[in-house]
Amino acid sequence: MKKIYILILISLSEILFSQQQDYSLYYKLRQNYENYPENDQRAFSYLRKYIRLAKKQNDSDHLVQGYKDGIFFSPLKEDKLKYSDSAISAAVLSKNNDLISNAYLWKGIIYYFNYKQYKSALNEYLKAYEYSKNSKDDFLKNGILYHIGVVKSYLGYYQEALNHFEEAKTNFKLKSEENVHPNLIYNNKKGYYNSLHRVIVCYRNLHNYTMIDSLISTGISQTQNNKEFDQEYGYFLKEKGIEEYRKKRFPAAIKSLQTSLRPITHINDFAWATVNYFYIGKSYMEMNNPSNAIFYFQKVDSIFQKQTFILPELRENYELLINYYKANNNNDRELYYTKQLLKADSVMSEDFSYLSSKVHKEFDTKTLTEEKERLEDAASKGFWIIIGLITFALILLLVLIIKYKSEKRARAHYKILEEKILNSNLQLTVKKDSPKLKDDEKIIINENIVQDLMIKLQEFEEKSGYIESGLTLHKLARKFNTNSNYLSQVVNESKGMNFNRYLSELRINYITNKLYNDKVYLNYKIETLAEKCGIASRTNFSNLFQEINGMRPKDFIKKRNEDLRNSHGS
C-alpha cells in the first residue's frame, strides 16, 4: 500500500510539474512578443508556436488568447477577421461564456474599425451581449455597452447612444479608480476616455453645446503629454477644433484639427481623419481661402474612393465641391463630384438610413440625377445640348416662380408685422371662435380677487415676466398667491384664450419686437431666440412664430436685414 501511495504521489507530481512547465512555456513565448506594437508581423515567429502548443494541449483558454493576439498583430484586416473566427470557434469549445462573449466582441470591433461595416459589427456585439448577461467581468460588459453605443451613434440614434456612453463612462471611471492590477487600470482609463469622447460627439450632433467645452477640457488635460493615451488626446483635440470652428475661431480651429491628425492617422482611423479634413477645409473657406479649402475637401473624397466609406455629416463636403466648381464653370469637376455625391448617398443609405433621412439635402437624389444627366448631355453636341438647356431653363423658371411667390408672401406678412410694431399694436389675438368656459364650468370668484389678478397680469406683461423658462400655470399661480383654477379662468375670460396660448403669444410678440428694434437679436441663432423668450424647443418656437406672425422667424430676420441694408444704402 505504501508503494502504491508513493507511486500516486509521484504521478501527481509529474502531472503538476508538467502543467507548470506548460504554463511557464506559454508565459515565456508570450513575453517574446507581447510588447510589440499593434500590426507588427514580428510577433508571429513566437505566436505560431504559442498557438501550436495550445492546440497540442487542447487548451481552449490559451488557444483563444493566441487567436486574439493574432488579431492584434495581423497587419491585414482580412487576417484579423480569420483569426477572430478561429477565436470564436475555440471559445465555443471551451464552453466559457466570458471567452465566447469576448471573441464575438473582437469580431465586432474588426467589422467596425477595420471594415466600417456597422450592421455586421452590431450583430456581433449583440451576440457578445447575450453571452455576457451573467458575466462578472465588468470590463467586458462595459466594452460591449460602449461598442453598441458606437454603432447606434453612427446609425444616427444619438440620444440612445449617449445613454450607452454615459453609463459606460461612469462604469469605466469607477473601475479605473480601484486598487487593481495596473493593466486593468490602464484598460479602464482607456475605456473612460473613449466613452468621454463619444459623449462629446453625441452632444455635438444633438446640438447640445452647454457641456461640451468642460468635457473637452477634461479630456485634453488628462491625456495631454501622455503617450499611453495619445490616440484619445487626438480625439479630444479634434472635438476642440470643431467647437472652435462653430465659434468662428477659424485659425485656432485649423491649428487644433491639424495637430490632432497625427495621433488619429497614426492608428489609421480614416473615419475621424475625414472629419478633420472636412472642418479644416470649412475653416479655410470661411477665411476666404478656397484653394486650401478645396485641397482638404478633396482629401475627404480621396479616402471615400479608397475605403468606400463616408460619414453622414460629411455629405456637405460634396455639396461644397459641387458649388465651387459650378461657380467656376468647370463642368467636368462638377459632374465628377455630383456622381461622387450620388455614390455617397447610396453607400450611406445602406447603413445610415435613419440618419440620412434627417440630413438636410441641398441636392436631393432626384435633382442630383437630373443635374448629372444635364451635365453629361452638355458634354455632347447637337440635339441633346438643346434638350439639356431647355430642361434646365424650365427647372430654373419653376424655381424662380416658386421663390417669387414665397418672397411675395413673406414680404406681405413682414409689412403687416412692421406696421403693427411701428404702431405699438402687437397685441394678443382674440379669436372669435376661441372656446369659452360654459356657465357650469365657471368658478365663482370674488370680484376683488379678479381685480387683483388683472393688476398682477398687467404687471406681469409690462415687466416681461413671461420670458422665464419653464413657466407654467401652476408656477405663475404660486407667484400671484392664488390657485391655478382662479388664474386659468381669469386669463380665459379676460384674454379670450387659454393660459398656454396667452403665454405663447406674449413670448412671440416680445421676440418679434426685439428682432425688429434690436440689431443684436438678428445675429442670434433660432435656438438662442427661443431661449431668449422662454421657449425650450427650437421647433416649437419656429412653429409658434409662423402660426402667430404668418411667417418663419428666419424669413422675418432675412426681411429685416434687407430693410436695414436698404436704409443704410439710401
Image (cartoon, rainbow, N blue to C red):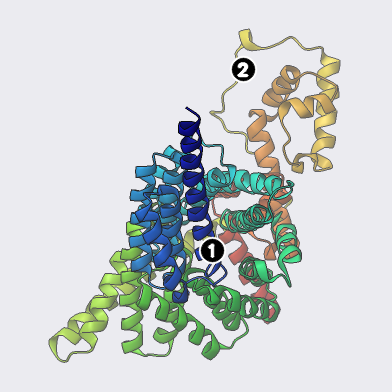
On the image, the x and y values in percent for residue 252 come to: 70, 78
Q: Which residue is mark 1?
A: 28
Instruction: Name the secondary structure under disc 2.
Output: loop
Q: Nearer the viewer, mark 2 or mark 1?
A: 1
Q: Is residue 325 above or below residue 145?
A: below
Q: Relative to residue 88, is residue 442 drawn left or right?
A: right
**Vertical relation: 378 (above or below) 125:** below
User: How far across and how far down the image is residue 455, in percent?
Assistant: 85, 29
Q: Is residue 126 left or right of residue 481?
A: left
Relative height, residue 270 to residue 432 (above, below): below
Q: Please give the name of the residue rendered at 45% of the width and 53% of the height, measured from the top-left corner.
A: 62
Q: Position of residue 97 (x, y in %)?
A: 44, 39
The answer to whether residue 426 shows anywhere in this view is no
Task: Identify the amino acid type marked 2.
Answer: Leu
Closer-to-camera residue (447/369): 369
First in sequence, mark 2 or 1: give its number. 1
Dot 1 crowding, Cα within 10 Å, few <14, some 14–19, many 20+: few
Give coordinates of residue 446: x percent, y percent: 82, 12
Toward the viewer: 451 or 359?
359
Looking at the rendered structure, which numbered label has been put on residue 185?
A: none
- Location of residue 500 with respect to 254 vertically, above or below: above
Q: Residue visible at 70% across and 41% down?
A: 506
Disc 2 and disc 1 in contact, CB within 8 angstroms: no
Residue topped by disc 2: 437
